Image (cartoon, grey):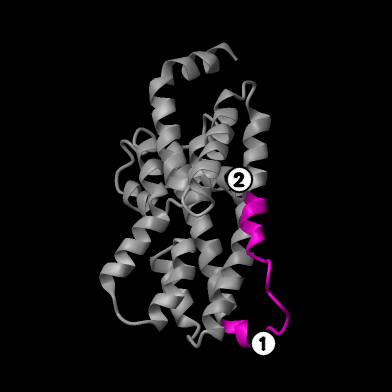
Amino acid sequence: MDNKRTMLKKALYAAFPHTIPILAGFWFLGLTYGVYMNVSGFSFWYPMLISLTVFAGSIEFVAVNMLLGAFSPLQALAMTLMVNARHLFYGISMLEKYRGLGLKKAYLIFGMCDETFSINYTACIPKDVDRGWFMFFVTLLNHLYWFSGSTLGGIFGSFIKFDTTGLSFVMTAMFIVIFMEQWLKEDRHAGALMGIGVCTACLLIFGANHFIIPSMIAILGILTIFRKVFEKGKSLS
C-alpha cells in the first residue's frame, strides 16, 4: 500500500507543473462558460453537470444555443462531430501510448482534450514515474480545472457586471505558450514547421471556418508518408 501511495504521489507531483498553464486558461474560459450559461437563463448546475460529463469546451459553448432551441438530437450529433472531429486524429496518435493501461484507459479516452493531448503526447516523463498514472493525473487535473471554473462561473455569474468580451482569447494564448514550450524542447523543428505550413495553406484554401479538418488530414498523411524521415531526424538530434 505504501509503495502504491508513493507511486501515485510521484506521478501527481510530476504531472501538476505541466498543467499550470492549462489551469490559468481553463479557469478563465470555464468562468466565462459558466457566466454565459447563467445569463442565458440556466441554473449553475447546468454548467456544473455538462462540464463534468461532456468536457469538450467548444461544443459546450455551442450546446447553449442547442438547449435554447428546438429538440433535434440528429443536429446535435452532427454539430458535435463537426466541432470535435479533430479528436479522431488525436485518438489515432495516442493508440500506442494508451496501450496496456488497463482501466485507466477508459478515463484517458474520455478526458482527452486538446491541451491534455498536447501534454501527454510530448511530455518527458521521468523514468521513476509511472507513465499511465502520469497521463491519468494530467487528464484528471485538467478536467477538474474546467469543472471548477465552469461551476464557479455558473454560481457567481449573476454577480459579475463587467464586460467579458475577449476572455476567449485566453485559449489562443495558452496554445501559443504550449507550442513555444515544445519548440524550445526540440533540437530540430521540421515537424513544427511542417504543421505551420500545412495549416497556413489550408487556411488560405478553405477559409477560417473549414480549415481544421483538412489540415489534420494533410498532417496525418504527411507524417505517415515521411514517418521514417522524422524518426531518423529525432535519432540524430
**In terms of secondary structure, where does tag 2 sit?**
helix
**Foreground disc of the pair 1, 2:** 1
Q: Residue at x 60, y 29 (%)?
A: 193
Q: Residue furthest left?
A: 74
Q: Which mark is residue 41?
A: none
Per the image, the residue denoted by label 1 is 159
Contact (Cβ within 8 Å) of mark 1 with mark 2: no
Q: Is residue 29 visible?
A: yes
Q: What residue does disc 2 label? A: 18
* Residue 230 belongs to magenta span: no
Q: Residue at x 43, y 34 (%)?
A: 218
Q: Position of residue 175 (x, y in %)?
A: 61, 48
Q: Is residue 20 visible?
A: no
Earlier in the chain: of badge 1 and badge 2, it is: 2
Q: Amino acid at mark 2?
A: His
Q: Residue at x 67, y 45 (%)?
A: 177
Region in magenta: 155-174
Q: Tell me the crowding category of disc 1: few under 14, some 14 to 19, or many 20 or more residues within 10 angstroms, Cα based.
A: few
